[in-house]
Amino acid sequence: MLSGQFATVSRLTKVTEQITAWRAEGHSVALISTLGAVHRGHLALVKTAGREAERVIVCAYRNPLQLGPDERADRHPRATEKDAEAIAAAGGHLLFTPADFDIFPGGTEGGTRVDVPDLSSILCGTNRPWLFPGIATVTMKLVGAMQPQVLVVGERDYQQYVILRRVLTDLLLPTRLVAVPTIREHDGLAVSTMNRQLSVRERNIASRLYEMLSAIRRRLQKGERDYAVLTDFGMKILERAGLTPEYVSIRQAVDLAPARADTARFAVFAAAKLGAVRLTDTVLVKPDPPPGA
């Protein structure tokens, strides 16, 4: 058992034993679920989790359910000793690196799935229908086994955040969901494991995704409400920059429904291919208050 030091654990039974010991000491637990390959975005989640709970667990698992037929698991490297050191330095207490048999004791084929069809079949789920059911299924397996007080996710994956919030609510689970603002590079590109796959030329182009989303955000804040015009504007910016846009979409932040004339808070989503890398990003928009408010 841990007495305060950091540890990397590969078996779920050992994790649950540790959580039982922590709870006996009166400690609350926060969980972060990742594919591994720690970056600054993950470490921001760890730091936030440390403010929300007294013990922080990071799960690094290359979830087979969220990888598509043409996506290789080795594009998401396994957690390393360097990752563990970074997580510990950020305030984490345990790194969980499970094998498939611990997460899927009955195998990955068939079995129980967690899905919110009206939310998982839109945006990134349109062309990747396996993605969000895969994420939700494994996340809820971890939540069920560990019963953390807090689950911490990043706002960059805002569709995932809304889906997990809905699942926790619908299943009457007491775990509280906390979203952390997107961590960005100096030019605005959202920090992501997949950025490592970009060539130097592609990396210079990639920041145009955030520039485009920021431009739409400014226009929404000024009161523009012709969403078709705004999304077409965004698609053309991406095309001119050399990206292959998949979609630009303006949604209600609360439930991901298409934005309406009276929408008060927006989420603007975009996805585009750049070489072999698929880039995604989201910005949240709350209109500026009227003068004097």
Image (tube, helix red, strand yellow):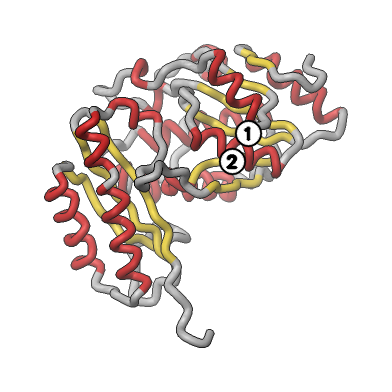
Q: Which mark is residue 152?
A: 2
Q: Give whichever of 109, 17 is nearer the camera.
A: 17
- Taking the spot 46% from the left edge, 23% from the top edge, the residue there is 37
Q: Would you place residue 274 above or below residue 109 in this image?
A: below
x and y percent of residue 186 in the render?
Answer: 39, 44
Marked residue nearer the N-terminal end (2 or 1): 1
Which amino acid type is shown beneath numbered disc 2?
Val
x and y percent of residue 161 in the render?
Answer: 49, 46
- Taking the spot 25% from the left edge, 67% from the top edge, the residue there is 227
Q: Are marks 2 and 1 in contact (CB under 8 Å)?
A: yes
x and y percent of residue 292 in the render?
Answer: 51, 87
In the rendered view, does 239 fall on the left or right side of 199?
left
Q: Badge 2, how many Cα within 10 Å: few under 14, some, many 20+?
A: many
Q: The residue tagged with tag 2: helix, strand or loop? A: strand
Q: The residue tagged with tag 1: helix, strand or loop? A: strand
Extreme residue in the bottom direction:
292
Q: Would you place residue 108 above or below residue 288 in this image?
A: above
Q: Badge 1, how many Cα within 10 Å: few under 14, some, many 20+?
A: many
| Residue matched to label 1 | 31
In the rendered view, does 272 fall on the left or right side of 286?
left
In the rendered view, does 11 fall on the left or right side of 272?
right
- Taking the spot 86% from the left edge, 34% from the top edge, the residue there is 26
Q: Give whichever of 164, 43 is nearer the camera.
A: 43
Q: Is residue 159 visible?
A: yes
Q: Give whichever of 269, 170 is nearer the camera.
A: 269
Which amino acid type is shown beneath numbered disc 1?
Leu
